[in-house]
Image (cartoon, helix red, strand yellow):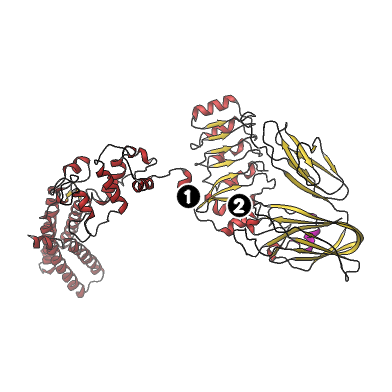
Amino acid sequence: MLLEIQIGHLHPLLVHLPIGIILLAFLLEIYSRFKPKKPFRESIEFTLFVAVVSALLSLATGWLLGEEGGYEEQALFLHRWMAVSFTVATILLYLVKRSTNLKLQKLYLPLFFVVLICIGVTGHFGGNMTHGEDYLFIEEDKEIVITNIQEAQVYAHIVQPILDGKCVSCHNPKKAKGGLIMDSPADLLKGGDNGILFDTNTNNGTSLFFERIHLPLENEEHMPPKGKVQLTDNEKDILAWWIAHGNCFDCQVKQLPAKERIASILNTLEQDTSAVAILSSKAEKVPKEWLTEIRGMGISVQTLSAHNSLLQVSMSGLDTITKNHLKSLKQYAANVIELDLGFTNFNDGLMAQIKPFKNLIKLKLQGTHITDAIGDDLKEFELLESLNLYGTGVTDKVFQHLTDIKSLKNVYLWKTNVSNEGIAQFQAKQPKTNVQLLNDELFRATVLVPPVIKGESNFFKDSLAITIESLFDDASIYYTLDGSLPTEKSHKYKDYLMLSNTAKIRAIAIKEDWKPSSIAESTFIKNNIEYEQVSLLTQPNEKYAGQKGVTLMDQKRGSINFVDGNWLGFEGKHLKTIIELKELSPISKVSVGALSAPSSWIFYPTAFTISISKDGVNYKKVGKKNMGMESPNAEVKLTFFELGLEPVEAKFVKLEIQSPLKNPSWHTEPGGKSWIFIDEIVLN
């Protein structure tokens, strides 16, 4: 009997041979109809003969395998006798093909189709026995998602999925190997031909189940058998933990004590189903070069972490946003989950440019020029959870669009034109969305937004009017003109300022019961000396060449977007330049405008030296300013460095501006070739 069973185990090896051979014979038969040649007939006859032999072998080994047991009787009966039918039909097909009887030959093709039908039905019944009924068309089981491991059912949510994946294919009602069925609690407790699974009744004092899964893989009684997907060490430990605590079927994880290793394994089963977690798993990696390029445009962009490529983008406070700023982010728009456009020039016309950001979870539009017209575009953001419309022109009309955003949790509407009635109607339709109508009480101890310093230009010849504005009408603004820190003891801003000399204005907003704002800063340069030309002795990088020497004398300040064309960039080298004045002029101050953006490898100059000449040949050094290397920081900022001189007359002025040449030791890429960016050189 043992030999018979071993021979029966050859069935999985032989069962597919007649299928392939019969299909080959059928294809040859069809092909021969188009190109009738004698060799085809002989080839087909030989192929059918091999099919007969392989069908007989498959039938014999399958019949012996069925004697081993473990198969549902009705399924086994159907499979066996369909296999017999197929084998008999194949023999008849071969005989008809060899026959010269014309009447029999008319039955050849119909019989061939019968054989094909038999082989399909036989395979279907065999598949049902091996893989389960309706294997081809059964719906995929819904994946069990555990969001709180402590509340999870130990059997239904943890143990049963393990058994379904590794055991049930051989131990189910249609195929019960060893008389064991494992797809229900009742059948698990019932056990199989070898006894009860969970009782401690083996020689080594463990349960039958525990013993079988820990046997060596080569042992015939090891489960799952060799060749099947094996249980992992973690799965074995979980099953052992469950059995050790009474193999309960209705208990929760929190009800069973778990040692550190088991607790650690259980925690790996918990899944974060938040939008951020789902998007993180699909997010495309963002290259550092792209981040550097975007930051160079004055856009703050950060990944959620070193290992998470989702992006937080902020243009807050920029009043020069264009379509190009938003289009520059399009390549990795799917990664952007937070976009802050607050207190910018963003408006309805630019709204279409953020449509590609389909995965936005947080959108900040506070203090912008938007209206209800953005409503249709808001519906595009199906994952949006937080929307800030504070201080905008929206009205109750916006609610008809917000009701389409089912994911929305918070919407901020303070200082808008919405009515209490409109809010009430919206919340009745969408009670899960929290409408935040912020007020002074809610904003207590909150940091104020910095004031905005405005002037017609950063350069002037005679005088210049300056205004300083705060978002809050009742906030007080204090300022200084010499670059010192502003406090409540500094000048209080009332109406406007009229500058007649170079000034570095620093301003702060203060409001009772609020934290003071951060300091706003802007430099306005008086420039009453006219230049003939600026000659560069050191050439800038071709990507950041602006208008060469003209860039340093055009009285146009560069922005924190260093690709705006108003900067000259020098990589790993100092800047040397000669300024020729229109006429001999007295000079008492030199100002150098520079940019710092450490994440883009751009640093302030470390020093600059001034030399003067009346003839352009003989130069005399008259001053040097040492700034030193920057302290660790990640800010994108710009400033003017000034050097006062004893008044001296000159027609030519030579400047040597020193670069740090390499990134400092505190930088993320220490030793890399660094840059200096210069936009203006002003003489007074």
Height in image: 283 above or below 152?
below
Which of pointers 2 and 1 indicates the residue nearer the eye?
1
- State how far apart marks 2 and 1 are (Cα): 22 Å
| Mark number displayed over residue 405 | none
Q: Residue at the location (86% across, 48% down)?
A: 501
Instruction: Give the quarter of the figure containing the C terminus.
Output: bottom right
Assign a secondary structure to mark 2.
helix
Task: Depth check: give the residue in front, 262 or 546.
Answer: 262
Left or right of 610 on screen, residue 336: left
| Mark number displayed over residue 280 | 1
Mark sitting earlier along the chain (2/1)? 1
Quarter of the rendering containing residue 475: top right
Residue 30 placed where, x, y %? 24, 65
Residue 203 placed where, x, y %? 15, 51
Quarter of the rendering containing residue 349: top right
Q: Which amino acid, by three-letter code, is at mark 2?
A: Lys
Task: Depth check: give the residue in front, 94 or 570.
Answer: 570
Question: Label 2 belongs to which residue?
Answer: 327
Height in image: 490 above or below 557?
above
Task: Depth check: give the residue in front, 564 or 396.
Answer: 564
Height in image: 189 above or below 283?
above
Assign a secondary structure to mark 1.
helix
Q: Is residue 391 visible?
A: yes
Extreme-left residue of the structure: 1
Extreme-top residue of the structure: 421
Instruction: Give the quarter of the figure containing the N terminus.
Output: bottom left
Quarter of the rendering containing residue 345: top right
Residue 133 is a magenta residue: no
Magenta residues, start to end: 545-557
